[in-house]
Image: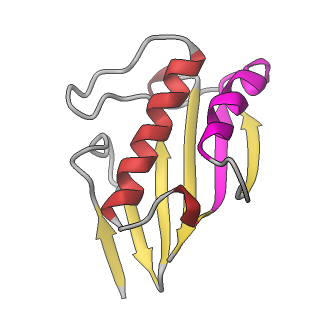
């Protein structure tokens, strides 16, 4: 059975999608961008600050499903420019100090709202 997961502590979807969907004990979390959940405003800061907010948004959605980063099986990272990889990776790595999930990182032409980083994940109970 499919269950829609929403957290008031993560940005509300800006389109026809859910923050996450839980199916057969697997959580599929939609891509998060550096949007402030309280104000709906984009963070315009360093790539490290943007990545930190993205990770906090993911954390909030995971928590709404009674999960945390230890449940994450795979992440997908989308960057506006591959030159940002090392700086994003440094912040991202702080959330996975051991047994990190599978992952891919790709640079794309543009991201929603012209942000520099978007991260999605899949987690298991």
The foreground one among 8 and 106 is: 8
Residue furthest to the front: 98
Residue 13 drawn above or below residue 88: below
Residue 44 at x, y percent in the picture: 43, 12
| Residue 86 colored in magenta in the image | yes
Q: Which residues are the magenta region?
A: 73-95
Residue 25 drawn above or below residue 83: below
Which quarter of the image is occupied by the N terminus? bottom left
Image position of 88 (left or right of 34): right
| Residue 94 colored in magenta in the image | yes
Residue 87 at x, y percent in the picture: 71, 22
So how many labels did they put on this image?
0
The foreground one among 52 and 11 is: 52
Q: Quadrant of residue 4?
A: bottom left
Image position of 29 (left or right of 121): left
Residue occupying the point 44% across, 30% down:
53
Whether residue 33 appears in this view of the structure is no
Q: How are the colours assigned in the image?
A: secondary structure
Residue occupying the point 66% across, 41% down:
77
Residue furthest to the top: 45
Residue 49 at x, y percent in the picture: 50, 19
Whether residue 109 appears in this view of the structure is yes
Residue 23 drawn above or below residue 46: below
Residue 15 at x, y percent in the picture: 33, 46
Residue occupying the point 31% across, 46% down:
13
């Amino acid at each position: 059975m499919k269950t829609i997961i929403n957290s008031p502590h993560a940005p509300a979807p800006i389109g026809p999608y859910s923050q996450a969907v839980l199916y057969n004990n697997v959580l599929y979390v939609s891509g998060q961008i550096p949007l402030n959940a309280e104000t709906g405003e984009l963070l315009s800061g360093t790539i490290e600050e943007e990545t930190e907010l993205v990770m906090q948004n993911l954390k909030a959605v995971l928590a709404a499903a009674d999960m945390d980063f230890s449940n994450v099986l795979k992440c997908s990272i989308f960057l506006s420019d591959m030159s940002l990889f090392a700086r994003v990776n440094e912040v991202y790595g702080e959330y996975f100090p051991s047994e990190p999930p599978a992952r891919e990182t790709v640079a794309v032409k543009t991201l929603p709202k012209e942000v520099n980083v978007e991260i999605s994940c899949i987690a298991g109970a």
